[in-house]
Every structure is written in structure tokens, then in C-alpha cells.
Image (cartoon, helix red, strand yellow):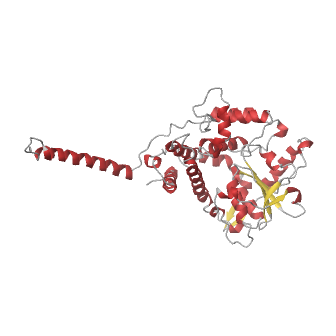
Amino acid sequence: MCCRASSHQGSNGSNVPLARCKLISWGCVVILVILVMNWYILEIPTGFIEDISPDAGRYAQKEMRLPEENRNISISGSFNFNRTHAQKQMELPEENRNVSISGSINLNKSYMEARRVTLNTMCELQPKPYRNHSISLLYSKGGNIAYCNIPKIASSFLKRFMLEIASSDKTTIDPFHHDAIKIHQKPLPRVQSRNLSSKNISSFLFVRDPYTRLFAGYIDKLLTPNEYWWSLGKNIVRSRNVTSVKPNCGHDVSFDEFINDLVSRARSNKTIDVHFNMMYLQCQPCDVKYDIIGKVETFNEDFKHVLNYTHKLENFNFSSFNEETEQDSIKKDVDKAFSFIKRSAPCISKHDALGRLWRKLQIRGLIGKKIFLSIKSLFSTKNLIFQRRLFIARFKSIPGFRW
């Protein structure tokens, strides 16, 4: 209306002010849209990433279950889809829980002893050919303790912890300041398990529900951009009955295909990657008498026993441990994903790669399922910017959070 009221015809009969006004109006609209996109998160669903079928997990349990005498120690708990439910399921009996009183921690060792009794009972059923093994364990001289590392069982954190306590004179223990990715490339001291008793070295391992460990391995190694696409993933893709559109990529392996491949390898005695291989084969708990048998499902409580054995219990800050763990996980996952985005370009788009990373953190319970990947996040070109988006999404996922 304003443009029409102020317009008049030029010498050539054209409506010059009106045309100029329309051009300015459209420019204002474009600028307004850009400002809105810069200040508000426009939510889009991540439905392009296929949900994992729950039937696949049940199939894995049915097909990969070993004979009773060869099964791993029974581990209760559930994967962290629902944090409240998981905490309830993992809660220790009241008499076995650690109690903090005036800054001191009272460690109840009865449930740890019960685990060793259960283990010894199961070991008595093991056939003799599988016994009397000596294995190589990570060793920290500062804590005089050895650790059997099993991938996908808090191994990044525990390796950093072993490196952190290598110096016995540290007054504050902070494993998080070590890089979570580079720690796997650092050569750490080792000791043979047969020498633990003679050298008076304590030892520990952590275990996890075997099926949630497989699921976590799939999410980490095959759903998100990873070097396993071009090894394990590619081999699975090439074994399909139908021709794949991108046979040199292992980016589209389903959970069913992953489980079928593991079942096939186990039945034919083929090598299984350490990230998915059975826990008892990696740590030989019937031969090594571990002082501490921890579980991921009760990690905070069990890790205090490790600290107690290394005389570092008072040097570790548990008040912010959960928050630091979540921040560390987000940073590690983003660093890893961005390091493979360029290499994965022939297989999937950058938007799809970032969407998969977002989905992974949703599955892990770090981001709520109703917090969708934003347009601004999709177009993030820098690692730190995407990390910031994820941290915002994490805060928005906290129950009762308000901006």
C-alpha cells in the first residue's frame, strides 16, 4: 500500500519507485528469514535414520547364547534408553550401597565378594582345556594395579585412569584431561597375569551385559562415521545376496546383518573383532584371580573400589563425575565423527553423517528423543560449533529444564 501510494510513472511510463520499493521489500524479507534462522533453532526430524528393530536384540540373545557352562557372568541392567528406568534397575541393595558421611566414603565389600563367589562357581564348570592361561594386562606402577581392558566397557576412561595414576605423587586424579582418542594409541606398561601374586599387584576388570555391549558396538562402529565401515562393514555388504549400490562402503549395515555376521563367525570359528568378542575370552577370569570385578551398570560404585585399592579414593572428585563423563562423551564422539566426515563423503553426505551422530547420542540417552537435529546444526562446518549445539541439546534434554 505504501509503495502504491508513493509511486508515480517515469518519463518512459515505468513505475520506477514501485519497482524499487518491491525490491527493497523482498530484500527485507530475506534478511528477516536469515535473522530468524540465526536466532531460533528450526527443528527437523531425524527420521531418515532407520530405527533399530528391538527384535534384532532378542534375535542376538537367542542365537548367540552359549552353553550354560561357557556363558559370561550374568549381568543385570539395561541399556540407557530411559535414564530413570536404568537407574532404578541398576540400583544396589540398600545394605550394599556406598554411603557418604561428612565427606568420607564407606565401602561395603560384601557384594564384590559375592561376585567372586559366583565367578568361582561358574569356573568350576569350565572344561580344563580352557584353563591355565596367562594374559597381558595394563599396569600402573603408581597405583601398583593391573587392568584387563575390554573394548566397549568404559575402556577409554579406564585407560586414561591408568595413565593418570602412573605418578604416585598426584594429589588430584583427573583422567579427563587425557585425550580420549589418542589414549588408544599410547603404549602403556604391561604385566603378565602369572606374575601378579609374586609382585603383590592388585588387579581389576569391568564387564557389561553382553547384548547391550554388542548394541553399543554397532552404534559406535557401524552407525556413525568410522573406520570400521571400510573393513567390517564392507565385508558384510559384499556378502549380501543383492548387489549393493555402493559396494566399497559399509555405511548401511543393519543391526540384523551385523548380528548375523557375528553368529556366522562364531559358528565357523572365525576371528571376531575385540570390540565384539566374548569378554571371558579376553580376560580369562577363571585363570586370573581379579581383586575387583566391576560392572558398567554400577560403574560409580564399583570404581570407588578401584580407587580404594590404589589409595586414590580421596583424590578423586565424584561430585561432578557424571557431568564430566557426559561432556567427555560428546566431545569424543564429535571429534571422531568430524575426523571421518571427509573420508565418508563418497558414502554419505555430511548432513547424514551429522544426523547419525545426533541419533547415536539420542540412543545413548544424552539427548532427548524429542530434541531434533536443527538446521543450524546440519550446516555446522566446524567441530566446536557442532559441539556447542550438542551441549545445548543436552541441557534441553534435562527434565525440568527451562530456557
Question: Residue 87 placed where, x, y %?
Answer: 64, 49
Question: Residue 216 placed where, x, y %?
Answer: 65, 44
Query: Along the horizontal axis of the image, is 125 left or right of 103?
Result: right
Placement of 106 over or under 215, stated as above or below: below
Residue appearing at x 80%, y 56% in the figure: 137
Query: Can you see residue 292?
Result: yes
Query: Along the horizontal axis of the image, is 249 left or right of 304?
Result: left
Count of all numbered marks drawn on residues in the image: 0
Question: Residue 82 placed where, x, y %?
Answer: 59, 44
Q: Quadrant of residue 62?
A: top right
The quarter in which the C terminus is drawn is bottom left
Query: Can you see residue 256?
Result: no
Work out whether residue 216 or residue 258 is closer to the camera in this orientation and state it. Answer: 258
Q: Quadrant of residue 56?
A: top right
Query: Along the horizontal axis of the image, is 265 left or right of 353?
Result: right
Work out whether residue 121 or residue 284 is closer to the camera in this orientation and state it. Answer: 284
Question: Residue 90 placed where, x, y %?
Answer: 68, 48
Residue furthest right in the image: 128
Residue appearing at x 73%, y 56% in the figure: 302
